[in-house]
Amino acid sequence: MKVYDTPDLRNVLLVGHGGAGKTTLASAVLFAAGAVNRMGKVDDGSAVTDFDDEEIERKISLQAALAHAEWKGKKINVIDAPGYAAFLADTKVAMAVADTALVLLDAVAGVQIVTERVFGYTEQYRVPVAFVLNKIDRENASFDRTLAALQERFGRTAVPIQLPIGQEHGFEGVVDLVAMKAWRSATDDSGKTAPEEVPADLAERASEARSALVEMVAETNDGLMETFFEAGDLTEAQLVEGLRAAVAQRRLFPVACASALHLRGIQPLLDVLADLLPSPADRGEAAGKNPKDGAEVTRRVAPGEPASLFVFKTIADPFAGKLSLFRVMSGTLRSDSTVANFSRDGQVERLGGLAVLQGKQQTSVPELRAGDLGVVAKLRETQTSDTLSDPANPIVFERVTFRDPAISYAVEPKSKGDEEKISNAIARLMEEDPVLRSRRDPQTGELLVSGTGQVHVEVALSRMRRKFGVDAILHPPKVPYLETVKKKVANVEGKHKKQTGGRGQFGVCVIDLEPLPRGSGFEFVDKIFGGAIPQNYRPAVEKGVRDAAERGWLAGCPVIDFRVTLTDGKYHNVDSSEMAFKIAGSLAFKEAMEQARPVLLEPIMAVEVTVPEENLGDVMGDLSSRRGKPQGMEASGHYQIIKAQVPMAEMLDYSSTLKSLTSDRGSFTMDFDHYEEVPSNVQEKIVAEYAAKRQAEQAG
């Protein structure tokens, strides 16, 4: 395969709300540029960048995927990123390797929640942006309405560089405002276009739109502004040069239009990608740190610099092994070279054969130059967000960080004995999904898998079944309730006496039990004076109390934050034993719990909910119904961020409720905050359910 130099590369990240047509646009670009011989479609599972079985079945993108095409001598690397909120982690990390974000909008739906969120990612990573108003040929689609919404949200710097020829089902092509040509697409869905004069009915509008574009471009450059004042216009070459520079500097966001599904406006869009978008060399130096002393380090994005690369995605392939997708940040990377992973203490990695990806298909390449994207297999220690570089020229690029998962589910193997297989499979999945988490709950004993929502976790388990042949059942996690006491009780006796024909069992202990401040745990105090209980039996009393406390009193939950003081007891020279005093301690604890006003404690979560302003009232009302306590609000664009403290038990089904309340435009995160006493009416219900369960188990 041809090796491309840095100025001839274009790394374009397709982002936008789910359903905007990113995967279809990727397929259209590849087909129109001749990189593939048929137009792939999401509906029939043939889209190049949706190759995962789960993606084909669900008909949505679940992970970032790479493809490439050549147009006008430029290699266009396309990164097709997910648009559904639960899978945006891949979209965010891909921002770190993109040189332009092509933000797609559905020309019917307009600006949506993920549109705003991914634009926020472009601000965070200073990635240039171009907009594409897609699905212009749909019923009720409107270029003007969508453009107005775009400019209202992102400002007048979102400037059209094209106008549509026709609307809705009559959409036939585009007017290029830079060259002032019309490009009418063939009606046979071949994607081919030919230049022609601007239609007469669009001539006046196109002239006005071009004048506005020229003024906007002139405003971004003093030299062009001077030329514009003198001549009253800019030449096409000046306009292209000024527009390209303004896009690279994020001073202008060009707006194009297309129908990806019917291949209308695709070749003119390819011209935009090749002519107006920045190359990796236009983005400035790659900045990182020296891992040895933390000093700032920069590298020119050029083939002659020391080699460095950034891994932005890991794929756990059960056949090919681990695949690492990367961007060459500087220098030239060659097959069979040696690099050091300075994100992991300089561990040496041997690169095998380098390849580029066309969806899931790999094509070997002898080398990749600065700015290009590729894949390498079987790196031992390397993970997503790691930096590898020339061992003699260390550098580490900033890692991409993610918010903690919002919700957890309990995972139970379908077949006995599969626990270890599940743990190993989940560990492999966590390598390729930077948000997925797994842990064993020490209290409930459940294996918990955490993700951004129920669909995220379900997809992970489905992939586990398909890739690694192990199946599991998903349950809501058990709420880890705790118990404690509110009243001090004294002189409570625990007596264990048993005569069985030979040596008997005898042990008596007397304890005080009292509550401690939250977070104190369990304290055991030995206040026996003299020999009421021999010293060697007293630890057995403590062990009996601990074991009984772990089993709970009200609802089988561990008892915390209390002190037991051993004050007196009796023993028998022959019949006493450690076991007898352990049982006596347990009996004393149970007797004390009856008198000490035991209560249940529940975990309270710190919750942040991001919702559109129009849904604020409904969401606040729902949180109140879940016993939520508001902690404040703050505005974020057209959204409100609600902060609240809500019992974990009330949040187990929140993901689906929020989706319903906000038409899937809301999102939330939650973290454990503290434990709090359960209201008496709720406690009665929990205790009754536990008693019924115990009774059923005993009867069975």
Image: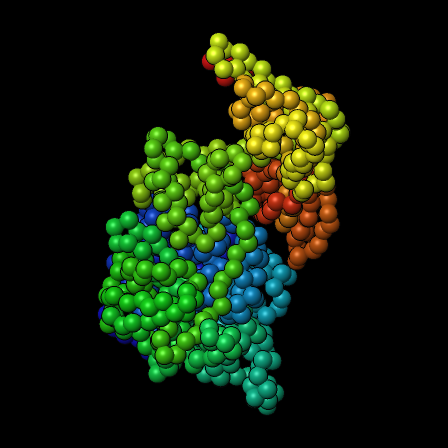
Image location of residue 225, percent across then percent down: 59, 85
Viewer-proximal residue among 526 and 397: 526
Viewer-proximal residue among 189 and 598: 598
Image location of residue 235, percent across then percent down: 49, 84
Q: Is residue 678 left or right of residue 443?
A: right
Q: Is residue 30 left or right of residue 61?
A: left
Viewer-proximal residue among 698 and 504: 504
Q: Is residue 305 above or below residue 409?
A: below
Q: Is residue 572 above or below residue 410?
A: above
Residue at left 52%, top 34%? 444
* Residue 242 appears anywhere in the view: yes
Residue at left 47%, top 79%? 298
Q: What colouring style does the render use?
A: rainbow
Quarter of the figure with residue 519: top right
* Residue 170 appears anywhere in the view: no
Quarter of the figure with residue 262: bottom left
Image location of residue 260, percent across then percent down: 40, 56
Image location of residue 678, percent across then percent down: 69, 31
Residue at left 33%, top 52%? 316
Residue at left 46%, top 48%? 436
Tally the marks. Answer: 0
